[in-house]
Amino acid sequence: MDGRTTTIKVGALARVEGEGALHVRVRAGEVEEVRLEIYEPPRFFEAFLRDRPLGDAPDITSRICGICPIAYQLSACAGIEAALGIEVSEPIRRLRRMIYCGEWLESHGLHVFFLHAPDFLGYPGAIEMARDGHAELVERGLRIKKSGNDLLRAIGGRAVHPINLRVGGFYRSPTPAELAPVADGLKRTREELIETVRWAGSLEFPEHELDCELLALHEDDRYAIESGRLISSAGLDIEPSDFLDHVVEDHVPHSTALHARLRARGHYVVGPLARYSLNHGTLSRLAQEAARDAGLDDTCRNPFQSIVVRCVEMLYAADEALRLIDAYEPPEPPAVEIEHRASAGSGWTEAPRGMLWHRYELRRDGRIESARIVPPTSQNQASIEDDLRAFVQANLDTNDEELQWRCEQAVRNYDPCISCSTHFLRLDIDRG
């Protein structure tokens, strides 16, 4: 490649919380430039929330993402409840954790079987994969995703943008009888996921490791999903109210989406690899054994193995949901009372794609003065660029077609909102 220029250009990355493109330029054997160009138009969700009653926040923010609405609803609840000094009951906490397990199943299920698996099996998409001898794998993915949707529907009222969650709890509590058929499906799902983790571990992965700080929520006695402190692989340990003291969001010339970094420390990654690497010891015994049998160590920094980690997390979610259903007692009352006051508060949860942070300023009349939301995709964007730079540099001897495939896959390693379009991208490579 000496003396030549190679340009990798993806003209349109649709549904990356907006729109974007990918540009990589190699000159004289060195990766000179990598840009994940996000040119999404303003979506104004933070502006939509101003002057609205605080109770509207969970329903409005859930529309940010149809794949993980629970993450936005519960992060909104966490931030507003922190502002108002609300402590919900333990039964409400358990029911929130239960519905979040459903979201992990449906979101990870979509990503693993329909967006990521075709990369490893050599197909442009799941439909082609199903037509060519892998129909059973696709059908298994549909069943697993359905079990998550069934749990969302039983607790939330519907599978997409559930309507039963509110600040302080729920509008109504599902009965044990309503959850019983969901549990039957989850038992079958749990068995299928044991085999799914084994299948994912058998795939071939390029040798590649992330070289950045990992951030995830942490709880001492369970795998962090809907609550916890934010910790990192380099010793960070903070509460939600400390977030902006440590994280800075910058504008970059090639993107309307902000790039996040840690003050004086650089870029970081949130999501499955970070969660697993920082919290492996709090997985259920079943999930830990499955991870070990699939070839995972206690930490995992290879983003191509994120498909295995997502399968382990689905297994944990099914196992945890069954544990919670078995011990379920309907919260009475389903929500705590709210007293309005002028205040501010922050909260976070672990969306399937990574930690999601919300902050709200509230007025005395119960309306929202201002809102700020930092989603996982924007937190990862700068690290995705760094990861692509390192991966392309290590694979410059790869032919154009293979390099195109691997660059797309490297993006898909990170999250479904980026992944859902990239199977259909055209990548043009100019070898100079």
Image (cartoon, rainbow, N blue to C red):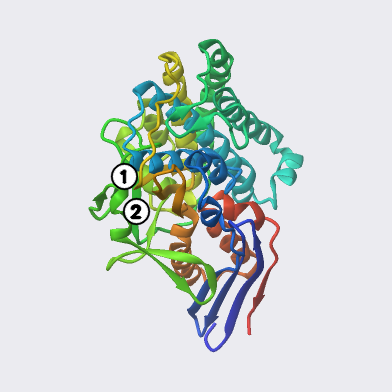
Residue under label 2, please give it. 214
Residue under label 1, please give it. 278
Q: Relative to the observer, which residue lies in front, 47 or 157? A: 47
Q: Position of residue 394 (x, y in %)?
A: 46, 69
Please identify the residue farthest to the front as the structure is shown.
365
Q: Position of residue 97 (x, y in %)?
A: 43, 29
Spatial CA distance of label 2 from label 1 is 8 Å
Determine whether 316 is above or below 42 in the image.
above
What residue lies at 59% left-to-right and 14% top-to-bottom?
Answer: 181
Q: Quadrant of the N terminus?
A: bottom right
Label 2, secondary structure: give it.
strand
What residue lies at 51% left-to-right and 55% top-to-bottom?
Answer: 46
Q: Position of residue 348 (x, y in %)?
A: 39, 44
Determine whether 50 is above or below 391 in the image.
above
Please identify the residue farthest to the top as the structure is shown.
177
Q: Residues within 10 Å of mark 2 (few under 14, many from 20)?
A: many
What residue lies at 52% left-to-right and 21% top-to-bottom?
Answer: 172
Q: Relative to the observer, which residue lies in front, 369 or 430? A: 369
Determine whether 7 is above or below 133 in the image.
below
Label 1, secondary structure: give it.
helix
Q: Residues within 10 Å of mark 1 (few under 14, many from 20)?
A: many
Residue 297 makes an appearance in the image = no
Please identify the residue farthest to the right as the structure is shown.
131
**Which amino acid lies under the numbered mark 1 shown in the image of this protein?**
Leu
Q: Earlier in the sequence, mark 2 or mark 1?
A: 2
Left or right: residue 101 versus residue 140 is left
User: Which quadrant would residue 272 be assigned to in this image?
Assistant: top left
Q: Relative to the observer, which residue lies in front, 77 or 248? A: 77
**Which amino acid lies under the numbered mark 2 shown in the image of this protein?**
Leu
Residue 12 makes an appearance in the image = yes
For the residues labelled 2 and 1, say whether their Cβ atoms are less than 8 Å apart: yes
